[in-house]
Amino acid sequence: IKIAGISSSPSVDIGKRALIIMCGDNGIVEEGVTQTGQEVTAVVTENMTDGNSSVCLMAERAGVDVFPVDIGVCRELRSGTRNPLIRKKLAYGTKNFRKEPAMSRETAVSAIAAGLCMAGELKEKGYRLIATGEMGIGNTTTSSAVAAMLLGRDPAEMTGRGAGLSDEGLRKKVSVIREAVKRYEAQCRDAIDVIACVGGLDLAGLTGVFLGGAVYRIPVLIDGFISGTAALAAAKLAPSACDYMLATHVSAEPAGKMILEELGLKPFVAAGMCLGEGTGAVASIPLLDMALEVYTKMSTFQDIRIEEYKQW
């Protein structure tokens, strides 16, 4: 019903669906807040262009076209054989926000604009549903920092183990984020400033995709924690953007539930997922397909001559 409202038509069409995966590196990795090295971002992104990553295999089964976007990976990438790389690189990774802002406000705006334009381009090509994903080592750190600042919460509440940090690693991650929040919170006027100070290019690009959902009237699926943080940033910039978002699942990261509550959105399932890449969003699409079958083909009470149930 929400999708019908977005499209302004009772005839819901989600037959042509896309997954936008924003890929970018994060300078905060220098601080040892991740289990793996920065080089993994490029490796996984190239796997996506060849159709070999987890989410690509899921997308093929769900009938979803995959669009990997290099918005800020720290090295040049090959185009790939299956899902050609979309080149929108704004920088070779962000800066270490413990030492300086992750990016300029202008770069953050450019990244948001890139995502917004992608939503428009896909709508123009006939896509009627957009799933969101990301790839960027260190992006649970950037997202925890952004979410903590946007919600005014203690970083310890918003920060999880990401891809599998030890207790010591988690304490360090929280400490780095808390230090950054104290450093930058006074100078941040809006969500764009927050992204510029402690965010990532992947997160900024996804923020634009969610804004594009509102501009071009196309439903956008929230994936996990990073995607949810981008949705939160979009909502802070344009509250009506929430009307075009669908929450697919609750991330296993601590802030996942808090973000969805702030957005006023109920997820389809819990699932306990924490892989990212758009896996949760893509996994929800078969549920939407089944719901659409019921929506379009189910008999009404009037059709089968049964008195309609009353709501008490």
Image (tube, rainbow, N blue to C red):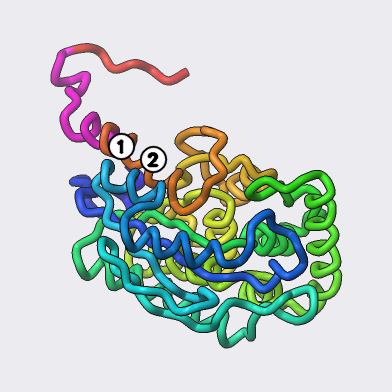
Q: Quadrant of the N terminus?
A: top left
Q: Is residue 99 left or right of residue 190?
A: right
**Displayed quadrant of residue 291:** top left
Q: Position of residue 256 (x, y in %)?
A: 62, 46
Task: Choose between 272 and 298: the one closer to the eye.
Answer: 272
Q: What label does residue 158 carry, if any?
A: none
CB contact under 8 Å: marks 1 and 2: yes
Q: Position of residue 294 (x, y in %)?
A: 23, 29
Q: Is residue 247 left or right of residue 151?
A: left
**What's the amino acid at mark 1?**
Pro
**What's the amino acid at mark 2?**
Ala
Mark 2 lies on a secondary structure that is helix
| Residue 296 visible somewhere in the drawing | yes
Q: CA distance from mark 1 to mark 2?
A: 7 Å
Q: Residue furthest top?
A: 306
Residue topped by disc 1:
286
Q: Write down the region rendered in magenta.
A: 291-305
Q: How many marks?
A: 2
Q: Position of residue 265 (x, y in %)?
A: 52, 45
Task: Name the residue located 53 percent from the left edge and 46 percent from the top edge.
Answer: 275
| Residue 235 visible somewhere in the drawing | no
Task: Name the residue located 69 percent from the left edge and 67 percent from the top edge.
Answer: 29
* 224 magenta-colored: no
Q: Position of residue 2 (x, y in %)?
A: 36, 46
Residue topped by disc 2:
283
Mark 1 lies on a secondary structure that is helix
